[in-house]
Image: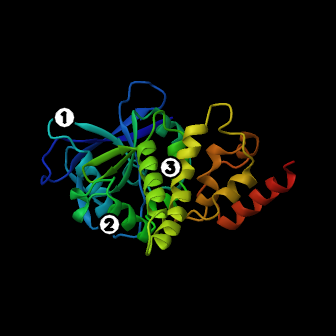
Amino acid sequence: PYFRLLRIKPGSPDDVIQCILESRPMYEGLSSYKALSYSWGDEPFSETIYIGRNSLQFSVSPHVAAALRHLRDPCRAVHVWIDAICINQGDLLEKSQQLSIMASIYNQAEQVVIWLGGNGDSNNQSLEDEEVIWSMCQQSHAWWNRLWVVQECVYAERCPVVMLGDHTMSLDSWIQTWTASYRSWRTRDGDSLNRTKILQDNLVFLRMPYDAWKTHTEDNIQRLPLLLRLRQTAERQCKVPHDRIYAILSIVDHREARWIPPDYRKSYSTLRTEVNKILRSSP
């Protein structure tokens, strides 16, 4: 199978974003790239990047455009995998085919980057800043509510890196920072009790993809039953109803997953009927 990589040309922060889409064979072992884990959100595709030698215009959300700017290097090209661009979202057959190798795409990346945003004041704020943490708690940041991030983190070869503007931190260090804030707020007076409860609720969502990454091995990653994974991820969000199933296929028991080949062309009601049949026949 093949997949696409986005080569971001060198440039300064204010330059337009110029890229080239390259097709690569999977498993060639030669690709050096970063795989982006981020939330799609509901922003309009109001920004333009330029792709190919003819600089074809391609519309992206401000969130994606900001990620590309911050990942861009001033001196050398950078290869990135990002689903909004590297998969033809309008081709349901291609989406289905690419989904089947998505776990491998994240596994082969030199780095999985969790992109939290880069506009506004975030460029001047550290990931360790308690006010940044509190702001994310109040907003219930879209990244850790997203269903797909569990798979994206689980298959990372190395611990994913969290990126907020120009600030980066490994996911394990960031979890430790959140845990320290939780312990600190718990001992304070005033409204800290309210803060502590909100932080604790957010931390539960944030820890799940990290704990899944930290404890997974090749032997146990596909051993959990489909029904258990569905219950574990029931409160996570996805834009397309099919993804309630497809986003967890690579982290459930392969004996069940093999009977659910991704196919966005079928209706969700048909998919749900097929899944219910598999669940009824499972031990």
Along the line of sight, the residue nearer the viewer: 197 or 219: 197
Position above or below: 242 against 260: below
How far apart are the two marked residues, 3 and 2, measured between alpha carbons? Answer: 21 Å
Q: Is residue 44 left or right of residue 125?
A: right
Q: Identify the residue at image location x=65%, y=65%.
A: 267
In front: label 2 or label 1: 1
2 or 1: tag closer to the N-terminus:
2
Q: Identify the residue at image location x=45%, y=38%.
A: 159
* x then y, percent, for residue 272: 72, 63
In front: label 3 or label 2: 2
Q: Identify the residue at image location x=23%, y=51%.
A: 69
Q: Is residue 252 left or right of residue 189?
A: right
- Amino acid at circle 1: Arg
Q: Which residue is mark 2?
A: 45
* x then y, percent, for residue 195: 46, 69
Q: Which residue is mark 3?
A: 94
Q: Secondary structure at mark 2?
A: loop
Q: Secondary structure at mark 1?
A: loop
Position above or below: 142 against 28: below
Question: Residue 76 got which mark?
Answer: 1
Question: Residue 21 got which mark?
Answer: none
- From where the camera sits, is residue 271 visible? yes
* x then y, percent, for residue 99: 54, 47
How far apart are the two marked residues, 3 and 1, measured between alpha carbons? Answer: 30 Å
